């Protein structure tokens, strides 16, 4: 398992352990993790959840009056190594 997959799974598992319901989605260049944040989340859980998402490459919070609060994180997928870094016709 690539390190980026393990990081995304770890973030989702730790947010779930705090009591947040998480969604994980695979995209071409990254894996996203989202968690709905209830109004009643204690301050200590907020601190812990922020420490968790800080391990991602990007993270943030979306808050709206219609949809509540969603904490999100994105972990970039590793670029596969290749022997042909110069492109076709540019090899020595």
Image: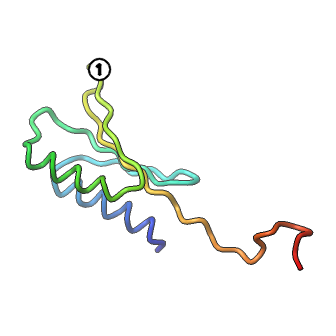
At x 17%, y 36%, the residue is 38
In the picture shown, does residue 77 fall above or below 81?
above
Placement of the C terminus among the 4 image quadrants: bottom right
50 vs 31, left or right, is left
The image quadrant that residue 85 belongs to is bottom right
Q: Where is residue 87 in the image (x, y as percent from the top left)?
A: 83, 66
Secondary element at image label 1? loop
Residue beneath the point at 78% across and 73% down: 84
| Rendered position, 3 above or below 18 | below
Extreme residue in the front direction = 92
> In the image, what residue occupies the spot 16% across and 53% down?
48
Residue 66, percent from left and from top: 29, 20
Residue 90, position as x, y percentages in the image: 89, 70
The answer to which of 13 and 60 lies nearer the viewer is 60
Q: In this view, does 57 lie to the left or right of 48?
A: right
Q: What residue did someone put label 1 on?
A: 66
Q: Is residue 71 above or below residue 27?
A: above
- Report the number of discs: 1
Residue density around tag 1, few if under 14, some if 14–19, many if 20 or more, within 10 Å: few
């Amino acid at each position: 398992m690539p390190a980026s997959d393990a990081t995304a799974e770890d973030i989702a598992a730790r947010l779930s352990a705090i009591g947040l319901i998480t969604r994980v989605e695979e995209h071409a260049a990254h894996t996203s993790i989202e968690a709905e944040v209830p109004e009643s989340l204690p301050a200590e859980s907020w601190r812990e959840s922020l420490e968790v998402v800080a391990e991602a490459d990007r993270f943030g919070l979306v808050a709206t009056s219609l949809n509540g609060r969603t904490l999100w994180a994105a972990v970039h997928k590793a670029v596969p190594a290749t022997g042909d870094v110069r492109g076709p016709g540019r090899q020595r």
